[in-house]
Structures are given as C-alpha cells and as structure tokens.
Amino acid sequence: MMKRMLKALILMISALLIVLGSSLYLIYNDRFYLKECKKLSTDCNESLDVLKYLENKGTLGNNFNIREISHMNDVKKLIEFITISFLVLSAILISVSLPFLLDKFKIKIYLGDYFFYAGIFSFSVILLFSVLSYFKFDLVFNLFHGLLFKSGTWIFSENDLLIKLFPIQFFIDTFFAIITISIFTSVFLMVAGIVIKRFK
C-alpha cells in the first residue's frame, strides 16, 4: 500500500515538474520573446527589457505606469515561487525515489517503469488539460490570474504598455508552447522507459 502511494506521488510530482520546467524554460527564453514580438508586431526592445527585469538584470523603463510596475513585481515574485517549487519538488522526487534507486538489483526495472509510466501519466493529464483550455482559454486565463494575483491588479486598458507588448495572443502562444514542450518531454520519457525496459 505504501509503495503504491509513493509511486502515485512520484507520478504526480513528475507531471508537475515537466510543466514547471517547461514554463521556466520559456520564461527565460529571449528567442521566444523575439519571435513573439516580431509575430505580433510589438516593440522587441521593450519586451526584452521586461525579460531582463524578470531575470533581475535590469529595471522597467519610464514608459510603464505605477500599476504596471506593481503587477510586474508580482509576476517576478510568482516566477521566483515557481523556481523554488521546481527545486523543492525535484528534491522531494529524489527523496521518495531513494528506496527504489538503492536496490541495485531492481534499479533498471524501476527506471524503466518510472520513465514509462511518468511519461504516460504526464502526457494524459497535460493533453486533457490542453484540450479543455483550447475551447475555454479565456476561462483558464482569468482563473489563473484570479488565483495568483490580487483582484483587479492584473486588469489593464488597451492603452497600457503591458497590453501593447503582451496582448492575449502572446499568452495563448506561450500557453500552448508550454503544452507542446511538456508533451514532447512526456513522449521522450515514455520512449526512454520502453528502451530501458527492453534492455534491462
């Protein structure tokens, strides 16, 4: 019973790590920002300044108003929380996996099963969530912001610079880019699991 609970915990943590890792990869990916600003015809220099701010490598320009600066400060704190969560979950995953990893006679079996089932579980959950979000993205977007930010602090007018730099299409592209990376990672885990199980 305890082993089943540990395995279930491992699968859930793995799915979370895949999504969080994919999110962090995109958040700090300047090539993604450049690609998006060119696609959406927004100011690339301003977009990269925002990225530098999130990376603690610069400050926001004078073109942002107080509410925008306050919101970006909240966004930076959220990213820091995501980073810490990723590291903590990674440590937990290693800790709960130790009983299986220390058994040198079954380590290949464990790794094969882990990669395979973690891949399947993550793929299924992420794919289901992406399908639901595809039809109800506005609902997911509003729910996400409503849960993570104080009421009203994330709503801006069309004239605000943040909206001009990051219109709703930017978030749609970002969301589905994270989903795509997460799905590819899940498929990679499945394939790796099959290979390890085959040659165990």
Image: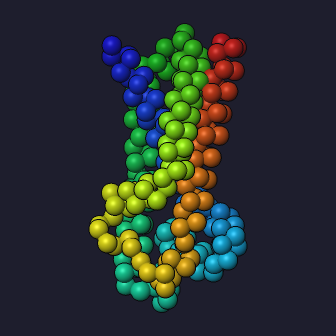
Residue ranking furthest to the bottom: 62
**Residue 174, quarter of picture:** bottom right
Total marks in image: 0
Is residue 37 left or right of 77 when viewed as pictured?
right
Identified at 63% across, 23% down, the residue is 193
Q: Position of residue 110 (x, y in %)?
A: 53, 18
Residue 119 seen from this side:
yes
The quarter of the picture where the N terminus appears is: top left
Q: Position of residue 64 (x, y in %)?
A: 46, 85
Is residue 153 left or right of 117 when viewed as pictured?
left
Identified at 29% across, 68% down, the residue is 151
Q: Position of residue 36 (x, y in %)?
A: 65, 67
Colour treatment of the image: rainbow
Is residue 49 left or right of 38 when viewed as pictured?
left
The quarter of the picture where the C terminus appears is: top right
Is residue 173 left or right of 9 when viewed as pictured?
right
Identified at 54% across, 24% down, the residue is 117
Identified at 50% across, 73% down, the residue is 53
Residue ranking furthest to the left: 151
Residue 58 seen from this side:
no
Residue ranking furthest to the front: 135
| Residue 113 or residue 137, whichever sits in front | 137
Eyeballing the image, is 123 above or below 165?
above
| Residue 3 or residue 90, whichever sits in front | 3
Eyeballing the image, is 68 above or below 6?
below
Q: Position of residue 133 (x, y in %)?
A: 50, 49
